[in-house]
Image (cartoon, rainbow, N blue to C red):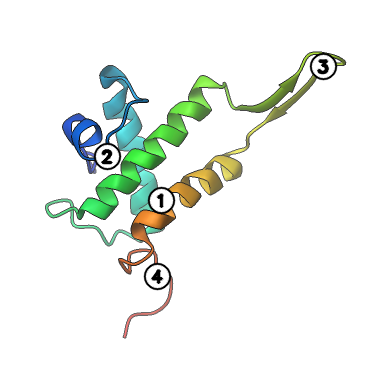
Amino acid sequence: MLAGYVDYRFYKDKYLGQVIPEPSFRALSLKASYFINMVTFNRIDPENVPDEAKMAVCAAAEVILKHEESGGKSSESVGKLSITYDTRKTVEKKMYAVIQPYLANTGLLYRGVGK
């Protein structure tokens, strides 16, 4: 079972995160770690997680927090009431967009067949 790729100390000291409160971090980083695991096709060794993957987890965890805080709403209007909700796909696209800079040159996002 995946325990999460990053701890709060890494989030605060290396990622320089300021958005996620410590009590919420473990659950959010675990969700983000599962997402990273999915998009990297289980290529990350939990015993030797590269810093790029840890940074990606922190970025994805912040996206998850923002989504949860908004109740899944991506926009809202008051006059003539208009509410738009993020779908799971939209949230996944946002997470992928924030993790890509960290993982792009690692080979972890490669979807092709090995050599």
| Residue at the disc numbered 2 | 15
Which residue is most to the bottom? 115
**93 on left or right of 21:** right
Question: Which badge, 2 or 3, is on the more N-terminal residue?
Answer: 2
Q: Residues within 10 Å of mark 2 (few under 14, many from 20)?
A: some
**Which circle, 2 or 1, is nearer the viewer?**
2
| For discs 2 and 3, the disc positioned in front in the rendered view | 2
First-in-chain label (4 vs 3): 3
If you read the primary sequence from the N terminus, does the residue marked by circle 2 or circle 1 appear first?
2
Q: Quadrant of residue 79?
A: top right
Percent coordinates x, y for residue 51 in the rendering: 21, 51
Please identify, in this view, whether the residue under mark 4 or under mark 1 is nearer the observer.
Answer: 1
Q: Earlier in the sequence, mark 1 or mark 3?
A: 3
**Given the image, on which type of amino acid does mark 2 rest?**
Tyr
Q: Earlier in the sequence, mark 2 or mark 4?
A: 2
Q: CA distance from mark 4 to mark 1?
A: 14 Å
Q: Is residue 16 visible?
A: yes
Q: Please give left or right for residue 6 compared with residue 81 in the image.
A: left
Label annotation for residue 110 = 4
Q: Which mark is residue 81?
A: 3
Q: Are marks 2 and 4 in contact (CB under 8 Å)?
A: no
Which of the numbered marks, if any, corresponds to residue 99? 1
Question: Which residue is found at the position 43% from the left and 70% from the top?
Answer: 111
As drawn, 48 above or below 89? below
